[in-house]
Image (cartoon, rainbow, N blue to C red):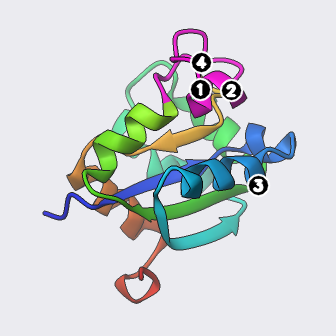
């Protein structure tokens, strides 16, 4: 299992506010290398598939509706210990509890509209990346 890959999404709230460029700059300035990147507008069905692991959770329906509400940027990032380092860089899910200088503290507004998604394990990073990219798309 490769520990140098993670998967991220810049969410509809951040794109809607025009924050995507600043978020991408912060990601690369921090030393992450973009290995694959695509902008798309997920359908409700695509969002349901991506978040299927959360289907039984109470937040599931609101999450898939939000994630299909506007364009997103999906990306694969490379960095040593990518998942752990990226999660530290973006901060906790709740922007109000995220550390100073983290992406979510700076760009998030609440638990759902927290600007970015980051994989929670190397296994999930590969699984999530494969939902949007084939192996030939990842450099």
User: Mark 4 against mark 2, which lies toward the viewer?
Assistant: 2
Rounded to the nearest whole Å, what is the CA distance between mark 3 and mark 2? 14 Å
Q: Evaluate whether residue 43 shows in this view.
A: no
- Main secondary structure found in the magenta portion: loop
- The tag earlier along the polypeptide, 4 or 2, is 4
Q: Secondary structure at mark 4?
A: loop
Q: Which residue is mark 3?
A: 21
Residue at the right extreme of this rendering: 17
In the image, residue 76 above or below residue 9? below
Residue at the bottom extreme of this rendering: 136
Is residue 111 in the magenta section? no
Figure quadrant of the N terminus: bottom left
Q: Position of residue 25 (x, y in %)?
A: 67, 54
Q: Evaluate whether residue 29 shows in this view.
A: yes
Q: Which residue is mark 4?
A: 95
Rounded to the nearest whole Å, what is the CA distance between mark 3 and mark 4? 19 Å
- The tag earlier along the polypeptide, 4 or 1, is 4
Density class for disc 1 (Cα within 10 Å; few <14, some 14-19, many ≥20) is few
Rounded to the nearest whole Å, what is the CA distance between mark 2 and mark 1? 7 Å
Density class for disc 2 (Cα within 10 Å; few <14, some 14-19, many ≥20) is some
Is label 3 in contact with label 4 (beta carbons under 8 Å)? no
Q: Which residue is mark 1?
A: 101
Which circle marks residue 106 in the picture?
A: 2
Q: Position of residue 73 (x, y in %)?
A: 65, 59
Query: Which contiguous range is marked in magenta?
Result: 91-110
Q: Position of residue 26 (x, y in %)?
A: 62, 48
User: Mark 2 against mark 1, which lies toward the viewer?
Assistant: 1
Q: Secondary structure at mark 3?
A: helix
């Amino acid at each position: 299992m490769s520990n140098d890959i993670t998967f991220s999404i810049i969410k509809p709230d951040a794109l809607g506010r025009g924050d995507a460029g600043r978020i991408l700059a912060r990601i690369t300035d921090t030393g992450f290398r973009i290995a694959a990147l695509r902008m798309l507008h997920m359908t409700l069905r695509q969002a349901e598939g991506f978040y299927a692991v959360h289907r039984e959770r109470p937040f599931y329906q609101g999450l898939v509706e939000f994630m299909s509400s506007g364009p997103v940027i999906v990306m694969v990032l490379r960095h040593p210990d990518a998942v752990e380092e990226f999660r530290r860089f973006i901060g906790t899910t709740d922007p109000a509890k995220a550390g100073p200088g983290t992406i979510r503290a700076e760009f998030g507004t609440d638990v759902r509209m927290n600007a970015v998604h980051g994989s929670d394990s190397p296994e999930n990073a590969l699984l999530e990346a494969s939902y949007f990219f084939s192996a030939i798309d990842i450099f």
